[in-house]
Amino acid sequence: MLHIVHKASGKLLTPGGGYVENDRTLLAAALREVCEETGLRPDDLCLTPQLLGKALDIDVHDIDANPAKGEPAHQHYDFRYVFYLMPDRAPVLELQDEEVSGARWLGFSDVRSPTLRAKLLAAKAQGLDGQPQPVNASALIHDGQGRYLLHLRDQREGIGLPGCSPCWAVAPAAQPASYVRIRGRVVRVTTEGAAEHIEALAQKYLGGSYPWFGGRDQVRVLYVIQPERISSPRG
């Protein structure tokens, strides 16, 4: 687990401490801070299959007043996320000189925060081993007019919805972590507006385009489906 030497406090801490600025999520803020302090790039890191975008630990601690900055006594809420290094990368750390004076890699049992250490050791028993794994990921996208953008098939081997081929799948509003299967008739197929709608939505969570979007000779279409049967794999 990567730790940095924080100049202001002299403590050995996990990187990423800071504030949410123009970030859309706490996860995005954590990733930005890690990259700023260590010189790592977003593409050097990936989420863990065990936690994905969930924080492993949330630490709340008191901060004394700082009259020089006009800050009253307050509390800090630290949301701690876990990232893996990508296996095909050997990035060189370029530490932020203004705030960081050094870096060390520590085993889980040597992590400085007691709560984070305990949760990392518990997660290790559940498979948190530093080895990235491919996982299925789905997005539920609604245009505000009763229409959803759905994912039917993927050309990559090993990617797909279990027991759901060929059918459409969406996440129900009451259980966004689950999904339901939809079978029905395609009542309309059109290319009108398809490229514009899909291109606007085909972005990574950090805002960068996927490499092949717009780069292959493909025809994009919109399907209008009349559902005939909706079922859940969980019954």
Image (tube, grey):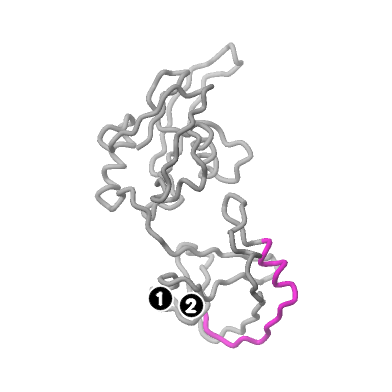
SS at mark 1 in the image: loop
Q: Quadrant of residue 139?
A: bottom right
For the residue marked with disc 2, what is the amino acid? Arg
List the residue tagged with mark 1: 233
Please tell me which residue is depicted at 62% across the width and 82% down the height of the picture. Answer: 225
Of the two numbered discs 2 and 1 on the same chain, state the one appearing first in sequence. 2
Q: Where does residue 57 sit, x and y in percent of width and height? A: 39, 40
Work out which residue is located at the far right of the displayed protein and give it: 192
Q: Based on the picture, tell me whether residue 186 belongs to the magenta stretch.
A: yes
List the residue tagged with mark 2: 181
Cβ–Cβ under 8 Å for marks 2 and 1 = yes
Please tell me which residue is depicted at 44% across the width and 76% down the height of the picture. Answer: 232
User: Is 149 on the left-hand or right-hand side of 12?
Assistant: right
* Label 2 CA crowd tier, 10 Å (few <14, some 14–19, many 20+): many
Q: Where does residue 124 sit, x and y in percent of width and height? A: 27, 47
For the residue marked with disc 1, what is the amino acid? Pro
Q: Based on the picture, tell me whether residue 4 belongs to the magenta stretch.
A: no
Q: What stretch of residues is rendered in magenta?
A: 182-200
27 in relation to 217, above or below:
above
Please tell me which residue is depicted at 61% across the width and 36% down the height of the picture. Answer: 21
Q: Nearer the viewer, residue 208 or 79?
A: 208
Label for residue 184? none
